[in-house]
Amino acid sequence: MPKIFVTRKIPEAGIRKLKEAGYEVEVNPEDRVLKKEELNKQIKQVKPDAVLALLTDKLDADVFEVASAQKPSVKIFANMAVGFDNVDLEAAKKAGIMVTNTPGVLTDTVAEHTFALMLAIAHRISEADRFARAGQFKGWEPMMLLGTDLSYKTVGILGLGRIGSRVAYHAVKGFNAKVIYYDVKRNEEFEREFGARFCMAPEEVLREADFVSIHVPLLPTTHHLINAERLLMMKPTAYLVNTSRGPVIDEEALADALKAGVIKGAAIDVFENEPAIHPELLKLDNIILTPHIASATEETRAKMAELAAENIIAALSGKEPPNLVK
Ligand code: GLV
């Protein structure tokens, strides 16, 4: 009976699918991230045919070496995430092990969370909540906690993949916003449909947008895409939102920019050195911080677990998995 190792407790829907396919499923009994040596040890002990992994697992050359050294080799690492910057794809290829991700099923949820952040920072929701709980509300005031409208503003999208496009859709359809975007690939059909404008460089987006929302994958070319110099290009009235990957922003530069009023505010779900958060960011009122939960709804996490399971089932049935990362 094929064996599957799941690196941490995931929604039952995914486990059920694997069991229904006739597999033996072993889940890391401790609800925490396994250290690399622990993961390697588990692979050696369990001798799985497939591993269902998470974005918190660092899948590097050592792990793939251990996974391919056992007989028979682990065939697939199914990452339960759309991002796969935790995976050394070259090493996986060298070891002859497939890697898959879970795109599509989380698009709407991450786009919703992006708007939750955008609206929360513009309408000062967290700050207002702290104010109310502290007993500071003494009655309606004409000048109290004034925020900023999103409607009819310019929303700048960096990275027009599935999630970036969905955010653009909501901005246009829901808020009558104007959308400008930068991506390595231009999408003229999208421009026609949403009246969006392509920018030749990220700097053009940064200079013009009232809200900048980041949706790029983490690559050497996107590391610190937002740094001190680029923050200075933004309007002092603008907001920055990030639901992609933390290292896309230089967190120290962001803290400095928020303190100095270089930009008005930021709302971020991802951090440069997760789970650590730059201590200066924690002190600021003009930033909202959520702990990497943009895809964290019951429905979506269940779908992600199921999709990771489907990728494993396809691979172990000798088929190409639907979400093979090439
Ligand atoms: C979450 O960050 C994901 O990549 O799915």
Image (cartoon, grey):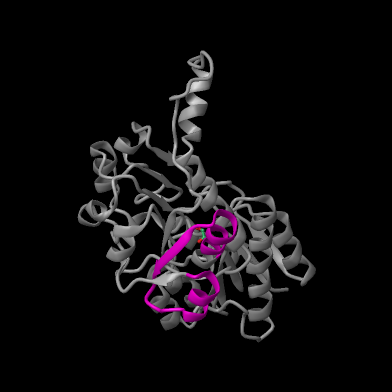
Q: Is residue 67 above or below residue 249?
A: below
Query: Considering only vertical position in the picture, is 95 above or below 60?
Result: below
Q: Position of residue 26 (x, y in %)?
A: 66, 60
Q: Residue at x 47, y 23 (%)?
A: 142
Residue at image x 54%, y 46%? 116
Instruction: Evaluate whether residue 216 shows in this view.
Output: no
State the residue in front, 90 or 179.
179
Query: Is 91 colored magenta in this rendering?
Result: no
- Can you say which quadrant of the picture contains the N terminus? bottom right
Q: Write down the quadrant of residue 248 in the picture.
A: bottom left
Can the viewer see residue 272 in this picture? yes
Instruction: Give, as a single range, the part of the protein colored magenta.
Output: 166-195
Can you give x and y, in whole percent of width and height, for residue 166 in the image? 56, 64
193 part of magenta stretch: yes
Q: Residue furthest left?
A: 229
- Position of residue 212 relative to residue 75, above or below, is above
